[in-house]
Each structure stands twice: as structure tokens, then as C-alpha cells.
Amino acid sequence: MKKMLIIILTIIFNKYTCLTGKDRGAYLKTPDPNELQYRLGNGIGYIGNGWDDSKMYILSSMCGYDGQRKKLPEQHFINWGYEIEVGDCKTNDKYGILDVVGYLATPSKEHSSNKTDNSELCYPANLYEPIWLEDGSVNPNNYWAFYINKTVTIYKDYIKIWETWNEPDYTRNYNDVSKWKTEPPEPKILTHWYGTIFEYIRLLRITYEVAKKVDPTCWVATGGLGYTNFLDAILRYTDNPDGGKVTEEYPAYGGAYFDCDAYHQYPQYGVTDEETGEGYNDNGSDILAKKVVILKKAIILLLKNMDLVLVIQINYL
């Protein structure tokens, strides 16, 4: 089954979380939506047989693509050096593939909360180490912060949107998803994350603070969510490991730490229109288009119900 990646970017302003800006980089600047436009993009994996990324990008451009979701894993950078993808990014620029989405994920085994071969699907270690040192530099013992700082510094001229992780809400325990409306998701069933919702909000916070300090014009996105109830949980809690409570150390709900929501829609899964109650379960192209719009509408309704002000919507397919 072909995977269709749908990302809806939504700039939001949360009246509860726009505070003093004492956290370096946080809440300081909202990106200018006029800098983005609708783009048709793809997410290229390893093909092999001589088809390297640059060749695939050229072919993508010839097929009419002018956007891209590009994976930039920490483990890849540690293995090959942080500048390994600069040449391919220059190829994108040359062939008109712009406003690229950088997908941030895959801590090294040493920097993962799980030191086994499953480290890619487990949240990073040391998330609650201080993000910043007293001199204003990034704390190297906060592994995710250090990775974000180096990655955004090197790729800020090529990447406009930073997507934080990949599908942290992925689960096969579908019957439990309805509980997320009122309860935190259980880490053991989040098989692309295996952490708490509070740790995911912490990941967003680190990404937001560090990326915004390096490039105030960038956009920080959620990690390709599949369930509006997971987004609901992000907006209800802080990154406080003690139940997501608001404190001086954890002053803001999760909505403070992203500019836009990225979601993934797979054509084989049905959706229900929350306003009409009508379900759509077929897989034809017309139905797929309806599914995308219905999920987008559900996200907008959630944002409005959570006292978030919808400013503008920008679509990226």
C-alpha cells in the first residue's frame, strides 16, 4: 500500500502559554506565514543500486515535486558527520525543492533511553538535563538539545520546518486511543516512542527553544501525529514529569512549543467526520481526499475548543 504523507501546518497562538519568554528562544517570534506556500513533496528512502539521494531529488523535480520531507537522524550524523547531507540539500535548492521539512529522530544507541537495537523507536535519554548552561550555550549532556543545535545551525539555510520525531502516537491498541481525551497515553503502547506524553512535550520544548535561538524564522512542528486525542493531550499538559502540572519550572502547556501541527493520513484507515458523524472507510482517491480534509477539520475544531486562535493554514502534501 502506498503511503501518502499529509502534513497540515497550522500557526497557533495560545493565550495560556505566551508568558515572559524567560526560557531562551521560547515564545519570542512567530514565523511569517507569507514565507511559505503550498508544496507537493515526498519522503525519499534508500533505494540502492546507484540511486543516491541527489539523483532521486532530480527525478522528483522532473516529476513536479517542489517540496520534501527529509530525514536527518542523529545516528546518521554521528556515523558520517553532521555535514553529510549538505550536498544533497544544495541539489534540492538547485532544482527548486524548497521549504523542506526536516524530520528529527533516531538518537544514537548511546543517547537513547533504550540501549538495545530498538533505540530508533525509543525516546532520547537525558531529556530532563538542563537545556542551557549558565553562559547561554547548549548543555552537551542534554543529548537532544545538542543534536538540535548542531543540526539547525548547519541546515537552517535549507530546512524551513522541523518535524519533531515521527509518529510518537503510533499504536496498535486502538481501543485505548479514546482514553487519551482525559488520560495520559500509556508509554508501553506507544511503540514509536515508549515514553510519556510529558517526555514528548519535553522533546517539543527542547526542539522549540534551541531551534528558535539558532533560527528565529524557522517553524517547529509536531511529529506527524495520527490521532487528534494525542494532540489534545499535548495541549492539556506541560513537560512536568509530575503529571504535567504547571509550575515555575514547567510554566507552559505543550501548545507553547510548536508553530504548526503535522499529521499523517494513511488511505487504508477510515475516519469519521466529528461534526456529521459520517464515516469514510473506502480507499478510492476521492475518498482519500475527503479523509484528509476531515482529519484537518477535526484538528481545527480541537484547536478552537482548547482556546487556541487559528491564524492561518498552510497545506503541504
Image (cartoon, rainbow, N blue to C red):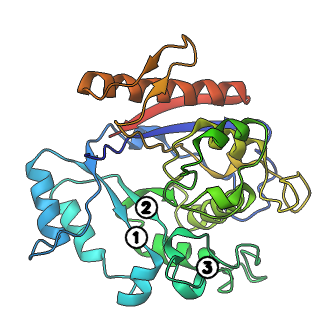
Query: Quick one: which residue is furthest to the top in this view?
Result: 276
**In which image quadrant can residue 69 be found?**
bottom left
Please state, as top left, top right, bottom left or bottom right, where the C terminus lies in the image.
Answer: top left
Alpha carbons under labels 1 and 3: distance apart = 20 Å
Q: Position of residue 148 (x, y in %)?
A: 54, 72
Query: Quick one: which residue is furthest to the right in this view?
Result: 247
Residue plotted at (53% across, 52% down): 170
- Tag 1 secondary structure: loop
Q: Which of these two is toward me, 21 or 222?
A: 222
The answer to whether marks 1 and 2 mark residues whose Cβ atoms lie closer than 8 Å is: yes
Q: Position of residue 193 (x, y in %)?
A: 59, 63
Front: mark 1 or 3: 3
Give the answer, above or below, for where 96 lies relative to 112: above
Alpha carbons under labels 1 and 2: distance apart = 6 Å
- Drawn side of residue 79 relative to residue 150, left or right: left
Residue plotted at (26% across, 65% down): 45
For badge 1, the amino acid type reads Leu
Residue plotted at (25% across, 60% down): 44
Tell me the residue that label 2 is attached to. Answer: 103
Tell me the residue that label 1 is attached to. Answer: 72
What crowding class fits label 3: few (fewer than 14 Cα within 10 Å), some (14-19), or many (20 or more)?
A: some
Give the answer, above or below, for where 11 lies relative to 286: below
For badge 2, the amino acid type reads Tyr
For badge 3, the amino acid type reads Asn
Q: Which of these two is toward me, 207 or 228?
A: 228
Q: Earlier in the sequence, mark 1 or mark 2?
A: 1
